Amino acid sequence: MNKTINYFLTLIFASMLISCNLTPKKTGSEGETTEKKTIAIKVPEFNPDSAYFYVVQQLAFGPRVMNSPAHEKCAVFLINKLKSWCQNVTVQKGTVKAYNGTILNFSNIIASFNPGTNNRIFLCSHWDSRPYADHDPDPKNHNKPIDGANDGASGVGILLDIARQISISKPLIGVDIILFDAEDYGPPQDWKSNVNTEDFWGLGSQYWANQPHKANYFAKYGILLDMVGAPNATFLMEGLSMHYAPDIVKLVWETANRIGFSRYFLYDEGGQITDDHVPVNKIRGIPTIDIIHLDRSSETGFYPYWHTTKDNLASIDKNTLNAVGQTLLTVIYNEK
């Protein structure tokens, strides 16, 4: 994703929402609240070991860079894995043009559970990896592709285990798992023309937003995962998510805090990120949020190893995978 964070534009707006709407609700002396009553619904237990293994399997192909053999092999793996759990898997194949004119062959992969209902939500992540380690501290690595363990594979690993869980225990709603391609082929930071607009990022999600896998596709809301596997990750409330879907941010953050993951899901504002949720919100009009690791202590404002050669398996922590995965399962199975 484009590493553009605009804290100034979102500071006042997000802060107002935090103070007015997003603080955890207090319980009475008997602990009887609306939130606690909803816990009675049976929510599957997320398996972080499975999610971690799915990350390992993705990385085993090598960097999943567009137009590479590793990319093609990983696509087959993801399609077959989803087909083992879901009877309705759609693959959008096509071409898009990169910032430098390169024609990229992409595959958006969609698994639809209970496709006959419009009472549905979708979960998404990108599965391709960055062709350049352009934020690596060593300039010699800037043209090397990255493993993308956290930046891509972590979100996909979580969604694969969620798909497996849904195949075993059906929720009351329809759920689409969407794996977007061609997200991370944007211009490197030292690109000669210094072009860095949002149009060059999230090419797969732009395509889907304009041409969804199902005519007149509708979902109540969407949740994007990006960089959701690092140790001690901090998920701030991303600015564009707050702009387009503050109620969904509230729902997810309150759920995470209620079930014990307050150390990850912080009631704090974040900057605006150009990511796959942008075209979904702007073009498709479906309120969609971005759960993404934001870290003000790092030089980039993101996960410290973002777009570097150290975004590898050593950067993945099962506790973080569990926090995000269990939160999403709880949201899904509490939907009516």
Image: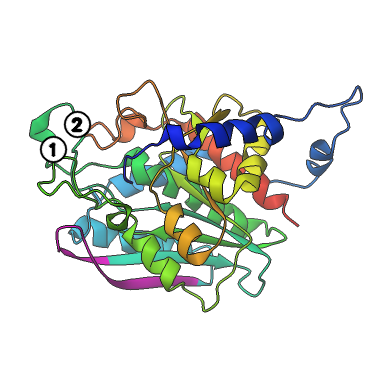
Query: Is disc 1 surrounded by few (<14), some (14 to 19) or many (20+) residues within 10 Å?
Result: many
Residue 102 lies in the magenta-colored region: yes
Q: Quadrant of residue 114?
A: bottom right
Q: Is residue 307 visible?
A: yes
The vertical placement of 1 against 118, above or below, is above
**Numbered circles on residues, count:** 2
The amino acid marked with disc number 1 is His
Which mark, residue 51? Answer: none
Q: Give 1 or 14, whichever is nearer the viewer.
A: 14
The amino acid marked with disc number 2 is Asp
Q: Secondary structure at mark 1?
A: loop
* Farthest residue, direction right: 30
Q: Give 250 or 133, whichever is nearer the viewer.
A: 250
Which mark, residue 136? Answer: 2
The vertical placement of 5 against 197, above or below, is above
The vertical placement of 300 against 129, above or below, is above
Q: Is residue 46 visible?
A: no
Residue 124 point in image, percent of width and height: 48, 54
Which mark, residue 142? Answer: 1
Along the polypeptide, which appears first: circle 2 or circle 1? 2
Residue 307 point in image, percent of width and height: 26, 38
C-alpha separation, residue under disc 2 versus residue under disc 1: 6 Å
Residue 63 point in image, percent of width and height: 23, 48
Say which quadrant the C terminus sits in.
bottom right
Give me the residue at 43% from left, 40% from top: 52
Instruction: Assign the magenta stretch its main secondary structure.
Output: strand
* Farthest residue, direction bottom: 215
Whether residue 199 sits left or right of residue 11 in the image: it is left
Give me the residue at 43% from left, 30% from top: 317
Looking at the rendering, the stretch of residues picked out in magenta corresponds to: 89-105
Q: Give 262 or 165, whichever is nearer the viewer.
A: 262
